[in-house]
Image (tube, rainbow, N blue to C red):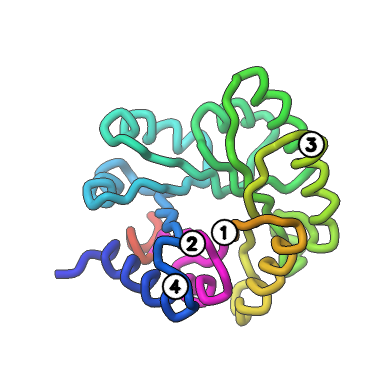
């Protein structure tokens, strides 16, 4: 019987080949938020090593133990972050995908030096310009990239987005790709369980998949 992980990997491979890219160009971020250790372990046992968590505290309760048991784990923070959690996030995560405001960027720059630990960053872009969603307005991304990368010397590697629910995501993915290209950023974190094949065909270099791997959230 094919496992959910094998199915997702096969879908990623097919979407990448159909978009003219090798499957290795696309990283699967397994979204393990709300999932207990015993649900994550089988995915780790199948070789998955990149995981996404929404909350610092929840991740801190699970991942130190798991990282001690499994090598080469890379943790991505994919949820909103308060400034007072920056130090804990730096200590725990390898990649921050939700950098979305100057105050947060300045906190990361300062505390990274204090901790002598440096993460990679994706800037979250509010491609749908939705009031209820976090992220930098598309029109403000260029100046924010300059602040983070040039002034604060953060390792900004790409952009992340969550398109509006119930709409065709392709135009939003295309917009994110265009913004990244004009800023010289190579990585695009876009696409989740419901739309990751589309995201890959639109240029995603990583996809954040939870429900298709673990089932519905607890």
Sequence-first disc among 1 and 4: 4
Between the residue at mark 2 and the residue at mark 3, the CA separation in whole angstroms equals 27 Å
**Residue 9 as seen in the image, left or right of residue 159:** left
Mark 2 lies on residue: 207
Choose mark 2 or mark 3, whichever is in front. 2
Choose mark 2 or mark 4, whichever is in front. 4
Residue 76 position within the rendered picture, expressed as x and y whole percent measured from the top left = 50, 44
Q: Secondary structure at mark 4?
A: helix
Between the residue at mark 1 and the residue at mark 4, the CA separation in whole angstroms equals 14 Å
Mark 1 lies on residue: 189
Q: Secondary structure at mark 1?
A: strand
- The answer to whether the residues at label 1 and label 4 have Cβ atoms under 8 Å apart is no
Mark 4 lies on residue: 16
The answer to if 202 sits in the magenta stretch is yes
The quadrant of the picture occupied by the C terminus is bottom left
- The answer to whether the residues at label 2 and label 1 have Cβ atoms under 8 Å apart is yes
Choose mark 1 or mark 4, whichever is in front. 4
Mark 3 lies on residue: 103
Q: Which residues are magenta?
A: 189-211
């Amino acid at each position: 019987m094919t496992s959910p992980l094998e199915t997702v990997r096969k879908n990623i491979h097919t979407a990448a080949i159909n978009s003219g890219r090798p499957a290795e160009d696309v990283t699967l971020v397994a979204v393990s938020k709300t999932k207990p250790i015993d649900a994550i372990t089988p995915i780790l046992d199948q070789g998955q090593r990149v995981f996404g968590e929404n909350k610092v505290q929840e991740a801190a309760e699970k991942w130190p133990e798991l990282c001690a048991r499994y090598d080469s784990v890379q943790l991505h923070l994919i949820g909103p972050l308060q400034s007072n959690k920056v130090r804990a996030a730096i200590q725990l995560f390898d990649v921050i995908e939700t950098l979305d405001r100057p105050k947060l960027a300045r906190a990361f720059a300062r505390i990274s030096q204090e901790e002598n630990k440096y993460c990679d960053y994706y800037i979250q872009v509010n491609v749908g310009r939705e009031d209820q969603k976090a992220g930098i307005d598309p029109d403000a991304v260029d100046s924010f990239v300059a602040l983070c990368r040039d002034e604060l010397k953060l390792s900004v590697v790409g952009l992340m987005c969550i398109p509006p629910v119930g709409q065709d995501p392709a135009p939003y993915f295309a917009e994110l790709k265009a913004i990244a290209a004009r800023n010289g950023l190579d990585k695009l974190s876009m696409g989740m369980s419901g739309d990751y094949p589309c995201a890959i065909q639109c240029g995603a270099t990583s996809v954040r998949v939870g429900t298709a791997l673990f089932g519905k959230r607890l």
